[in-house]
């Protein structure tokens, strides 16, 4: 049952939940008003099975809650995510610029990792994740989806990964941990394969 799941608020989970067009459409509809699942499925021209499967994921990620009467509504967390996408769409920031901003923020996080400031780096990585999370949605909202944009996003994501891992590599080299240096180098290599 959907209401029995504990929410999982991890950034990775959030990325996965926002990757599907049906889930994004559900969030947009729920931003307008609460819905029952059958109403939502009907308005989005989805089968009940598709709607249930996707809604279960949204509830599990903490973006949507199910009330006692069965009404589905955005959680405060879900409202913030939808609001960020809407603001970025209104501002007219190009989706590729959002991708690039995410990369630059991750480079800042890499510097923090190199200094051993892991807690601060974690928060900065989370901030960068917001840009990575919304760039595709903004592209869809503004009708700017292109092959180049998808490719650019994918390449910048790999650069972000490499930058963060480079920060760890520098940190482990500075504290003289050769095993972790080698391990990080292996992960760096695997992340671009």
Image: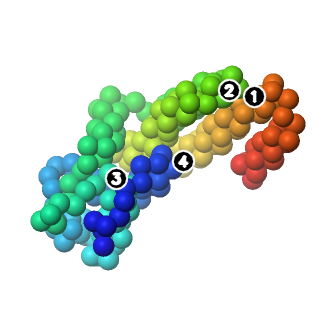
Q: Could you give the CA–CA distance between mark 2 and mark 1, rounded to whole angstroms?
A: 6 Å
Who comes first in sequence, dot 3 or dot 2? 3
Q: Do the residues labelled 3 and 1 touch (CB within 8 Å)?
A: no
Q: Is residue 185 above or below residue 52?
A: above
Please give the residue where the numbered disc 1 appears in the rendered image.
171
Cα–Cα span, label 3 and label 1: 34 Å
Residue 175 at least partly seen: yes
Asked if residue 39 lies left or right of residue 186, the reply is: left
Q: How far apart in space, not on screen, are marks 2 and 4 (Cα)?
A: 33 Å
Which residue is at 47% across, 53% downward? 13
How far from the left and from the top, in percent, is residue 112?
A: 63, 24
Q: Which mark is residue 150?
A: 4
**Secondary structure state at the residue bearing disc 4:** helix
Query: Nearer the observer, disc 2 or disc 4?
Result: 2
Residue in front for this viewpoint, 80 or 145:
80
Decide which of tag 2 and tag 1 comes sooner along the chain.
2
Of labels 1 and 4, earlier in sequence is 4
- As drawn, the label of residue 62 is 3
Q: In this view, does 11 lie above or below 26?
A: above
Earlier-in-chain disc, 2 versus 4: 2
As helix, strand or loop, the secondary structure at mark 3 comes to: loop
Rendered image: mark on residue 39: none
Element type at marker 2? loop
Q: Residue 30, how many percent across, how many down?
A: 21, 53
Q: In this view, does 49 lie above or below 22?
A: below
Disc 2 and disc 1 in contact, CB within 8 angstroms: yes
Which mark, by number, is residue 116?
A: 2
Tag in front: 1 or 4:
1
Q: In which quarter of the image is residue 95?
A: top left
Mark 3: few, some, or many residues within 10 Å (few <14, many ≥20)?
many
Residue at (56% x, 43% y) in the render: 153
């Amino acid at each position: 049952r959907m209401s029995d799941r504990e929410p999982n608020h991890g950034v990775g989970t959030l990325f996965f939940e926002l990757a599907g067009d049906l889930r994004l459409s559900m969030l947009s509809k729920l931003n307008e008003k609460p819905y029952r699942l059958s109403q939502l499925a009907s308005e989005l021209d989805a089968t009940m099975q598709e709607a249930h499967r996707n809604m279960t994921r949204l509830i599990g990620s903490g973006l949507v809650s199910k009330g006692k009467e069965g009404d589905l509504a955005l959680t405060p967390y879900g409202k913030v995510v939808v609001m960020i996408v809407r603001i970025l769409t209104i501002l007219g920031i190009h989706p590729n610029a959002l991708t690039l901003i995410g990369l630059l923020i991750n480079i800042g996080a890499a510097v923090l990792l190199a200094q051993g400031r892991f807690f601060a780096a974690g928060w900065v990585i989370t901030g960068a994740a917001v840009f990575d999370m919304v760039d595709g949605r903004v592209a869809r909202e503004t009708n700017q989806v292109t092959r180049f944009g998808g490719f650019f996003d994918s390449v910048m994501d790999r650069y972000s990964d490499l930058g963060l891992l480079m920060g760890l590599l520098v940190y482990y080299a500075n504290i003289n941990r050769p095993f972790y240096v080698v391990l990080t180098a292996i992960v760096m290599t695997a992340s671009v394969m």
